[in-house]
């Protein structure tokens, strides 16, 4: 009976142990599953944290997969992609990436995605444009890789918003176009020259017409030379810039596109790097051929002018608005008996009597104010000499026709005035004589026998008395040869 009782007690214990073992066996897979789920959850959280880290560095990360919903369905997006597109995660998950792509880029983007999903390699970044939720076009830069996500094939894409970069590129492009327009609008050659090897890095079309500017040196382009210029007549602008580290201006002789010599004025400007080294020189050339020809012609003209002025008998001088003599020829200086250097800077009030100087100053002021020429005749007293003069004051004009000085030409007309005085006296004498002659004109009644003349009052006068009263003629009495012979013979008999 006792053994039966013991047996009865052991049986429940054994069954309990077996039951516990069975429970443990049943719980083991569930524990492993929960551990696996926990590990998977932790892994996904770490993966999600890594993906979301892109938002902090300005990079969007999305996961694209092909599902029953379509191609390129977004199964994961980070915060940066939400910021770029303007959509929430809930709005983005489950829709195709290509729904956001601009129609002009959609086919190209889809083609690259399919190649990636097939495991094909693609080089470089891909630029495309998406349409944001508010309708604004956003340029992006995308690169992707083939991967798996949640046990399925996937394509992970790394995306950057390149709006600011595009704006900067557009601005640079606009600046380049503006610079190119400015350079091409220049009518004179413009170059950028490498400071080390003299090669032309940039040139406008005026500088390179008829020649290839690729790898050409400045001296080959402008001088048709195999070596840099460096003579005393042609110092090298680049070497001068490197030596002085300042802008330079040098005159050179260059060849034009037709091979003709041209006088040019070379302007060189240094270009420094961040360390202060001269790395390039900006050069532009002004064609001064016509100016040089004009200067040469001017020198010849000035030589002829000086010869003409210095040998002229007229008094020639330049005078300013303050009545001050700026220059004069030798004839004018001789008038005062002084060297012309002694007269430079003197005023007319220093050289002439006050009344004459005041009238001259008045005429000079009129020329400065009107810009017209004035010619006057007057008496002049210079030292102890008194003479008649004719003075022509002509304006010398500068910028905007402003009178800057006056040239005076004075001629001694004393002899002409004396001749005019004598001529006037002669004319008056002739007029008086003519008047007297006219008083004797007409019919004069004269006695045929005694030769007396009857005047206007009816009185008879001798010829001598009649003519004497009406002219200044005087009579002397004598005997003509015929009367002398006639009356003298009679008297003698």
Image: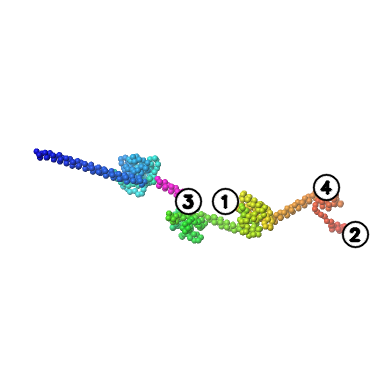
Residue at disc 2, secondary structure? loop
Q: Can you tell which of label 1 and label 4 is closer to the viewer?
A: 1
Instruction: Tell me which numbered mark, 2 or 4, is placed earlier along the sequence.
Output: 4
The mark that comes first in sequence, 1 or 4, is 1
Counting residues from the N terminus, which is met first, the one under dot 3 or under dot 2?
Answer: 3
Task: Please provide percent x and percent y for residue 100.
Answer: 36, 42
Real-space CA distance between mark 3 and mark 2, rounded to the nearest whole angstrom: 129 Å
Q: Could one spot residue 407 in this view of the protein?
A: no
The boundaries of the magenta stretch are: 163-184
Residue 151 is a magenta residue:
no
Q: Are marks 1 and 4 in contact (CB under 8 Å)?
A: no
Residues at marks 1 and 2 touching, judged by CB atoms closer than 8 Å = no
Displayed quadrant of residue 473: bottom right
Q: Nearer the viewer, residue 304 or 375?
A: 375
Residue wearing tag 3: 183
Q: How crowded is mark 4: few (under 14 residues within 10 Å), some or many (20 or more)?
A: few
Residue at 77 percent of width and 52 percent of height: 433
Q: Which of marks 2 and 4 is in front?
A: 4
Circles 4 and 3: CB distance less than 8 Å?
no
Q: Which of marks 3 and 1 is nearer the N terminus?
A: 3
Secondary element at tag 1: helix
> Residue 399 got which mark?
1
Residue hosting label 2: 493
Q: Disc 2 to disc 4, how far (Cα)?
A: 43 Å
């Amino acid at each position: 009976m006792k053994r039966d009782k013991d047996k009865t007690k052991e049986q429940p214990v054994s069954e309990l142990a077996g039951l516990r073992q069975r429970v443990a066996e049943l719980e083991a897979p569930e524990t492993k599953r929960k551990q696996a789920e926990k590990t998977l959850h932790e892994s996904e959280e770490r993966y999600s944290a890594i993906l979301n880290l892109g938002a902090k560095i300005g990079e969007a990360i999305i996961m694209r997969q092909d599902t029953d919903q379509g191609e390129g369905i977004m199964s994961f997006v980070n915060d940066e992609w939400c910021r770029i597109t303007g959509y929430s995660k809930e709005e983005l998950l489950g829709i195709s990436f290509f729904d956001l792509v601009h129609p002009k880029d959609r086919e190209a983007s889809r083609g690259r995605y399919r190649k990636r999903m097939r495991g094909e390699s693609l080089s470089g970044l891909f630029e495309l444009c998406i349409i944001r939720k508010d309708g604004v076009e956003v340029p992006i830069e995308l690169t992707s890789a083939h991967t798996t996500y949640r046990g399925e094939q996937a394509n992970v894409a790394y995306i950057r918003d390149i709006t600011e970069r595009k704006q900067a590129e557009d601005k640079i492009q606009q600046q380049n176009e503006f610079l190119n327009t400015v350079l091409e609008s220049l009518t004179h050659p413009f170059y950028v020259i490498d400071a080390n090897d003299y090669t032309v890095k940039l040139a406008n079309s005026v500088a390179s017409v008829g020649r290839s500017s690729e790898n050409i040196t400045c001296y080959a382009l402008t001088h048709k030379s195999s070596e840099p210029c460096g003579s005393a007549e042609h110092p090298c602008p680049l070497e001068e810039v490197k030596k002085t580290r300042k802008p330079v201006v040098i005159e050179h002789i260059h060849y034009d596109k037709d091979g003709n010599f041209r006088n040019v004025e070379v302007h060189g400007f240094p270009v420094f790097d961040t360390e202060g080294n001269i790395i390039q020189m900006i050069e532009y050339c002004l064609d001064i051929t016509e100016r040089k020809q004009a200067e040469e012609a001017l020198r010849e003209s000035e030589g002829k002018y000086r010869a003409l002025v210095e040998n002229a008998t007229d008094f020639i001088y330049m005078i300013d608005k303050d009545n001050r003599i700026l220059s004069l020829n030798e004839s004018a200086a001789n008038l005062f008996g002084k060297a012309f250097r002694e007269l430079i800077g003197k005023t007319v009030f220093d050289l002439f009597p006050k009344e004459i100087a005041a009238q001259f100053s008045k005429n000079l002021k009129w020329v400065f104010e009107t810009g017209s020429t004035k010619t006057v005749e007057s008496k002049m007293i210079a030292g102890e000499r008194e003479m008649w003069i004719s003075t022509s004051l002509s304006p010398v004009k500068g910028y905007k026709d402003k009178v800057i000085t006056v040239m005076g030409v004075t001629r001694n007309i004393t002899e002409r005035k004396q001749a005019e005085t004598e001529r006037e006296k002669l004319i008056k004498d002739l007029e008086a004589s003519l008047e007297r002659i006219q008083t004797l004109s007409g019919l004069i009644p004269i006695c045929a026998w005694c030769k007396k003349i009857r005047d206007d009052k009816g009185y008879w006068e001798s010829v001598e008395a009649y003519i004497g009263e009406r002219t200044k003629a005087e009579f002397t009495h004598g005997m003509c040869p015929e009367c002398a012979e006639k009356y003298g013979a009679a008297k003698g008999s």
